[in-house]
Image (cartoon, rainbow, N blue to C red):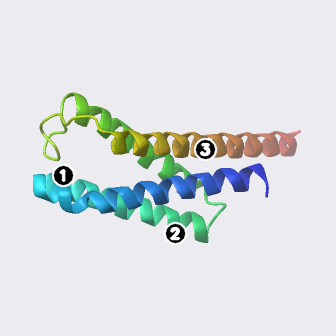
Amino acid sequence: MTPADLGRDIVILACAISAGIHGALVPSHFDEGTGPGLGFAAAAVVLTGIVVWLTRRPESVLALAAAAATFSGLLVSYALAITTGVPVLHPHPETVDGLALATKAVEVVGLLAATGLLRRRVAITHARTEGALS
């Protein structure tokens, strides 16, 4: 297993864990309102899609970028949810809890792995381009 394979597997695992947690919390968030329920359902669906995408197309730079963007969005959304609330989805600040913090830790690891792989791919592409031009 190469470092790139390990990094991709970490991204896939982080997406799968986050998707499972978001999916499990959909019913309780629909109890809070349609916005929060739809937000959690959308997160679960998008993350599951990225898992399938990266599993079927492990070399996809676009899938890695989608994972990085999704993790970034989830992390920013949570930061807003616990500080100011998120208009429409969760207008009032929510309390911090252990499951949410654990989920965010998994997402940070996934984000770091995805961005690391993206940086590596850019560096390899740049090196190949420079070599072809010289």
How many numbered marks does the figure carry?
A: 3
Q: Is residue 66 above or below residue 87?
A: below
Identified at 66% across, 50% down, the residue is: 7
Q: Answer yes or no: do the residues labelled 1 and 2 have beta carbons within 8 Å?
A: no
Task: Give the structural element (helix, strand or loop) at label 2.
Answer: helix
Identified at 12% across, 36% down, the residue is: 92
In the displayed image of the protein, which residue is found farthest to the top? 83
Quick check: 90 left or right of 134? left
Query: How far from the left and from the top, in percent, is residue 80?
Result: 26, 33
Identified at 79% across, 54% down, the residue is: 2
Query: How far from the left and from the top, in percent, is residue 45?
Result: 36, 64
Q: Badge 2, how many Cα within 10 Å: few under 14, some, many 20+?
A: some
Snapshot quadrant of residue 20: bottom left
- Judging by the rendered image, the residue that carries numbered circle 2 is 52
Residue kind at label 3, given as amino acid type: Ala
Q: Badge 1, how many Cα within 10 Å: few under 14, some, many 20+?
A: many
Instruction: Please report whichever mark, 3 or 1, sits nearer to the chain's N-terminal start.
Output: 1
Quick check: 110 left or right of 97? right
Q: Badge 3, how many Cα within 10 Å: few under 14, some, many 20+?
A: many
Query: How far from the left and from the top, in percent, is residue 90?
Result: 16, 43
Q: CA distance from mark 1 to mark 2?
A: 25 Å
Q: Quadrant of the C terminus?
A: top right
Q: CA distance from mark 3 to mark 1?
A: 28 Å
Q: Is residue 17 above or below residue 98?
A: below
Query: How far from the left and from the top, in percent, is residue 40?
Result: 27, 56
Relative depth, front residue between 133 and 104: 104
Q: Answer yes or no: do the residues labelled 3 and 1 have beta carbons within 8 Å?
A: no
Relative depth, front residue between 61 and 111: 111
Instruction: Please report whichever mark, 1 or 2, sits nearer to the chain's N-terminal start.
Output: 1
Numbered circle sitting on residue 36: 1
